[in-house]
Amino acid sequence: MNSSCLFKSIAVLFLFFTLQSTAQKKELYNHLSSDVITISSKILNEDRTIYVHYPKPDSTNVNKRFPVLYLMDGESHFDMLSQYTDYLSRWDVSVIPQMIVVGIVNTKRTRDLTPTKSIINYFGQPDTSAVSWMKPSGGSEQFLQFIQTELMPCIETNYKTQPFRIFAGHSFGGIASIYCMLTHPDMFNAYISVSPSFWWDGEYVIKLADKKLAKGAMLNKTLFFSDASEGVSDGSSFHTNLLKFDTLLVHKELKGLDYKYKYYPTETHMTEPMVAYYDALRFIYKDWKAPGAK
Amino acid sequence: MNSSCLFKSIAVLFLFFTLQSTAQKKELYNHLSSDVITISSKILNEDRTIYVHYPKPDSTNVNKRFPVLYLMDGESHFDMLSQYTDYLSRWDVSVIPQMIVVGIVNTKRTRDLTPTKSIINYFGQPDTSAVSWMKPSGGSEQFLQFIQTELMPCIETNYKTQPFRIFAGHSFGGIASIYCMLTHPDMFNAYISVSPSFWWDGEYVIKLADKKLAKGAMLNKTLFFSDASEGVSDGSSFHTNLLKFDTLLVHKELKGLDYKYKYYPTETHMTEPMVAYYDALRFIYKDWKAPGAK
């Protein structure tokens, strides 16, 4: 008899039929343990879809609790962060703790992730079009209220959470993350800001940082921020804005702000999250030791 | 009414009950499309479990075919490579083509991934113990025959494959990948060797490379290899072996071998695959352009 290629739980006769049926194939391998939940938000007046990835249950420690990483652009980067946190916390890798990843799926991205109403576009020009994509901007305050008063209680009631929370975002999500650190410092312990769109509304977030951060202030926060080739490839001030923010942090002589700025000139705006989220997790947990480790 | 946190397709009454039922939660979010298949191998005289990840079907191009990445240590790195290839080939990232990832799950890892029978351990000492883990070594030739004559035909019959194939491995999988390039150059087009265990059997694979690769030979292959802090952290020749192999390739003045060696001194043997597999994919496809791209 020749060697045969059999799909588990499927009769040989149906082999080729089944192989062509995508619906049946999809559930045969279970990559990671994750939920899809829906929150009917009173604050945002809409249903929000949330993805939640959690560590595999450990029968020897059923009461174990985990830090939570809240991730913007859930539909884009939830698979990535789920895989990263799972791999890096595996017993034989063990450089970060196991954690819960909460991916917030966008409905009106520009509305939620921008701090102010603005029609000044990336090139510094006003976009006066009646159908401008920038019209529904300036909703970050409500979005953060949704996270604080509706999403967090839901996650903390239903999952085994620790108090340590990370807020992570890319592009507009990058400014939303830093905006949150400046305006609601009680919500998170650590922030990841991958290629923040500091250009928004005449560098509003950089100016806000200058205003909100008192010289020598004690923050007790961890912050990782980064950018890629954006400023070089399009001749904009994208990169110089990051340098400006970095310099501002230095001049503020802040206490208890453990931060790192990383520049990836060979990555693009869209490849960068893969390397930046990895480096950010390693940075946040650089001093972490696995329980029992030497 | 207060905002409520509802699980899709689940009645409110059963909310907390359901949240505690792991079995029901697991399938609510589907990370990626993958199969588990079993091959009854005549060559290895055992059943082999294979994970297969494939791009989501594209209704506008149902006949699209994909390169295939064959990955050793499937149980360790299949989630990672599946997520990497999916993300990097997304329409809005698009720096590599969509591909199929075939994860080969180990049964007897040392047997399959080592080229020779040897009892010389990592520290150069003979391990004469009757129960030595090194006893069942030297089975790479049979393992490659299994891949060539049983696994590949199964994948090529059941999935939409292109002829371009990559062979990827870590540690013992790293030497198995290079051993395959040297002894069965017809099987793959590109090779990824993350921290190859060149120490095996008195640097057998390096000596084999010196013997098999004629000076100035035309290979028409792509090769990425790397190591991390191994040699530094344990004082062994792990790192110097990589340098030796790199020097050998230079001296051979090979034609058509597009290769890159990368050293990650700040990564460990187990964190390195996360950065090395990323860099390897970017290297193999550095000249790739998405169809229709400028």
Image (cartoon, coloured by chain):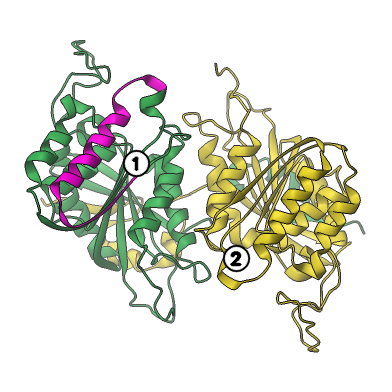
Chain colours: A yellow, B green
Q: Name the residue under label 1.
A: B226
Which amino acid type corresponds to the residue marked 1 in the rendered image? Answer: Ser
Mark 2, other Cα within 10 Å: few <14 / some 14–19 / many ≥20 = some
Instruction: Please provide the residue range marked out in magenta.
Output: B233-262
**Is residue B261 within the magenta segment?**
yes
Residue plotted at (53% across, 50% down): A275
Which quadrant is the C terminus of chain A positioned in?
Answer: top right
* Residue situated furthest right in the rendering: B1
Q: Which residue lies furthest to the bottom in this view?
A: A130
Quick check: A140 above or below A125?
above
The part of the image, by quadrant, that contains residue A46 is: bottom right
Residue under numbered circle 2: A230
Q: Is residue A25 magenta?
A: no
Q: Which residue is drawn at 10% across and 53% down?
A: B216
* Secondary structure at numbered mark 2: helix
* Closer to the eye: label 1 or 2: 2
Residue B3 picture location, percent across and down = 86, 57
| Residue A185 picture location, percent across and down | 85, 44
Residue A180 left/right relative to A16 = right
Q: How far apart are marks 1 and 2 (CA)?
A: 29 Å
Q: Position of residue A150 (x, y in %)?
A: 84, 52
- For the question of whether residue A148 can be seen, the reply is yes
The answer for which chain carries disc 1 is B
Q: Is residue A28 something one can see in this rendering?
A: no
Give percent across and percent down for residue A178. Answer: 77, 52
